[in-house]
Image: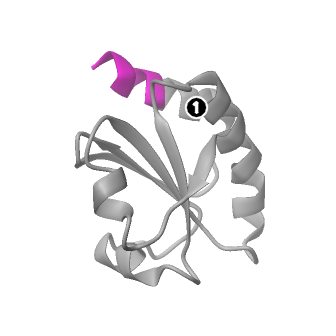
Amino acid sequence: MVQALTDNQFNEKTAEGLVLVDFWAPWCGPCRMQSPVVDELSEELEGQVDFYKMNVDEEAKVAQEFGIMSIPTLLIKKDGQVVDKLIGFHDKQRLSEILNKHIQA
């Protein structure tokens, strides 16, 4: 399940394990395409990856800290460290390959 994340929760929620954060906005067309892909993978990889969404219009601080200029941007963190930053739409197969690479690492 994909959970909403706020600027105040970001460090705590992304400090441990493998985490994907989807930076998005409601007006963004590619974000609306990315969302169902992220939702599907959150179900398939439950217990292996934590999935979060951050609305950049409402929660801008973290997006600015990480230099998020284009959305959708998917930030992948492992044990608190950024291990991947994916900009633009990514299909399910590609995103699954990237996440599985980090699960196995």
Q: Pick the residue in front: 8 or 98.
A: 8
**Which residue sits at x=46%, y=45%?**
20
Compared with residue 64, is residue 97 higher up or lower down, i.e. above or below? above
Classify residue 58 by image quadrant: bottom right
> Tag 1: Cα neighbours inside 10 Å, few (<14), some, or many (≥20)?
few
60 on left or right of 43: left
**Residue 28 in picture, x, y percent from top left:** 72, 72
- Secondary element type, mark 1: helix
**Which residue sits at x=72%, y=61%?**
30
**What residue is shown with label 1?**
94
**Residue 71 in picture, x, y percent from top left:** 57, 68
**Residue 92 in picture, x, y percent from top left:** 67, 33
**Which residue sits at x=64%, y=23%?**
44
Compared with residue 94, is residue 39 higher up or lower down, i.e. above or below? below
Classify residue 63 by image quadrant: bottom left
Span shown in magenta: 99-105
**Which residue sits at x=45%, y=24%?**
48
**Residue 53 in picture, x, y percent from top left:** 56, 58
**Is residue 80 highlighted in magenta?**
no
Q: Residue furthest top?
A: 104
Classify residue 90 by image quadrant: top right
36 on left or right of 71: right
The quarter of the picture where the N terminus appears is: top right
The quarter of the picture where the C terminus appears is: top left
51 on left or right of 104: right
